[in-house]
Amino acid sequence: MTESPSTKPANGDVCQRVKNGLKPERNGLAKSLYRCHEKKSKHHGQPEEEEVNATSHHGVPYSRPFVESYEQTPMLPAIERCNIAGEKEEQRDFVPLYQDFENFYTRNIYIRIRDNWNRPLCGVPGAKMDLLERTSPDYNWTFVRSGRVLQDVINLGSYNYLGFAENKGPCADAAAEITKKYGVGVASTRQELGNLDRHEELEKLVARFLGVESAMSFGMGFATNSMNIPALSGKGCLLLSDELNHASLVLGARLSGSTIRVFKHNNMQSLEKLLREAIVHGQPRTHRPWKKILIVVEGIYSMEGSIVRLPEMIALKKRYKAYLYLDEAHSIGALGPRGRGVVDYFGLDPCDVDVMMGTFTKSFGAAGGYIAGKRELIEYLRSHSHSAVYASSMSPPVVEQVITSMKCIMGEDGTTIGCDRVHQLAKNAVYFRRKLQKMGFIIYGNEDSPVVPMMLYMPAKIAAFSREMLKRNIGVVGVGFPATPIIESRARFCISAAHTKDVLDRALSVISEVGDLVNLKYSRQKIQPSVARSFDDNVFEDIDD
């Protein structure tokens, strides 16, 4: 098996084997940027929790502690080796007796547990929601709606981070009023007859919200990535992509025709190694310099709950004269003291990020996405982006939903509702995550992330956990292969500012009960006291009970 840039060791040494499902050097820092501290010896199975102090490390400023946790997989659920049936070497030229693993997985696992996905909602995806009950007469090949509605199901799966996805309140009222004036559809593209004054107001507001020169909106978040990356990069360009980037980023990179190299997740050593090699060797065969080098990362990674190491990423980008593309789909509105995303979270200058991308789907309770940055960049995309030239304009009520919610976050509506929701989300995320860790569950990601992955490991436990939770009137999202490795299945909780403490306590009680029933409390470690943080003073009082 040949070594690709993503599989080669980041430090030039012999590549270590993956142990118990945990990748070595997962959260490495660039040696030239950050001097690793000596670590005390740990007991067996000690959680691999990495802390970056608030002080500056060789010019890389961290204004706050940066703590992520990826506890080593215990031997109980680990699979060290998989002996899948396959063809013998002397029979490789015959018609194969065995289909590929994906087909096997679909027939024998996914079909049996797919009742845990695509559940039909019949209400607003708020802190609680209503679900239509389904039954299957043929083991999940088809579904029949029973007509019964499961009411007041606690919603732990929607991306409604700030609670703006609602059918009443200022956002809903403003969207209803704008619908009476403009209607629902525009029936044209922005370059023809679909450019409304509300679209232009939205883009000016987004630019002001992010602190950049200009911004451009699009009707679909997925297409914002997949259609704009090809406009920014092409043949002769190099894309350096995090191995856990979203499918929209991967598709955009492939459509661009650029050379793609993958670095280990959030690993600055791996990224710096690829940057050095790209500059030294240039393009394959010709060894000409690359036309441009574009680093593509996310603010919050939706399956890991981790936050990008943006200060070090910017330092590397400046050192090697590369460009940085930051996808803030899950972080915009959900991170930072002002809800401005991961740039606000670290207290950095927005101008240091060349291309800022985000979606209106999560924190703003709407649909669509944006690209923001320098004025020259936006003017170029207006005429070269397929999503701008050929796609229909955003629906007026959707635009108004974004404008109203964004002004609410900025405090321009004359209230503190938006600011209060941002702070409440931060409290809820810390509270929920710490409680789960104290119960004995293995939780991935950063302490401040509203995305909380709880490890289930075995694919069969997705169904067991999700079904038992729904029996107790709590809706959760299970994630498995191919979105994750087959033995790293997980439940992904999305915390919202709309969740009250009583709702969270009820959910935590049920999660603990089901965790005991399904045997999910894999963690063997005592949780160490968390580092003091400036915004922890108002976190719920019983968080350390």
Image: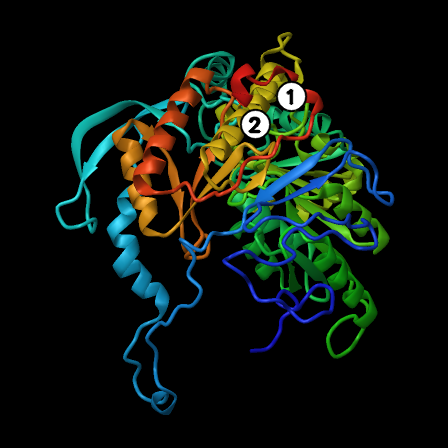
The local secondary structure at tag 2 comes to helix
Residue 186 appears in the rendering: no
The residue that appears at 80% across and 64% down in the rendered structure is 276
Q: How far from the left and from the top, in percent, is residue 466?
A: 32, 39
Q: Is residue 386 above or below residue 192?
A: below
Q: Nearer the viewer, residue 541 or 389?
A: 541
Q: Is residue 528 left or right of residue 281?
A: left
Q: Which amino acid does the dot numbered 2 rest on? A: Val
State the residue position of label 1.
536
Decide which of 84, 6 is in the foreground and name it. Answer: 84
Instruction: Please identify the quarter of the rendering in which residue 536 is found.
Output: top right
Left or right: 250 in relation to 521: right
In this view, 327 is above or below 111: above
User: Which amino acid does the dot numbered 1 rest on?
Assistant: Asp
Badge 1, how many Cα within 10 Å: few under 14, some, many 20+? few
Q: Are marks 1 and 2 in contact (CB under 8 Å)?
A: yes
Q: Residue at x 54, y 21 (%)?
A: 543
- SS for callout 1: helix
**Location of residue 303 in the rendering, given as x and y in whole percent from the top left corner:** 51, 45
Against 42, is 395 above or below? above
Residue 258: x and y in percent read 66, 63
How far apart are the alpha carbons under marks 1 and 2?
9 Å
How many residues crowd mark 2 within 10 Å: few (<14), some (14–19), many (20+)?
many
Applied colour scheme: rainbow
Disc assigned to residue 430: 2
Q: Is residue 145 visible?
A: yes
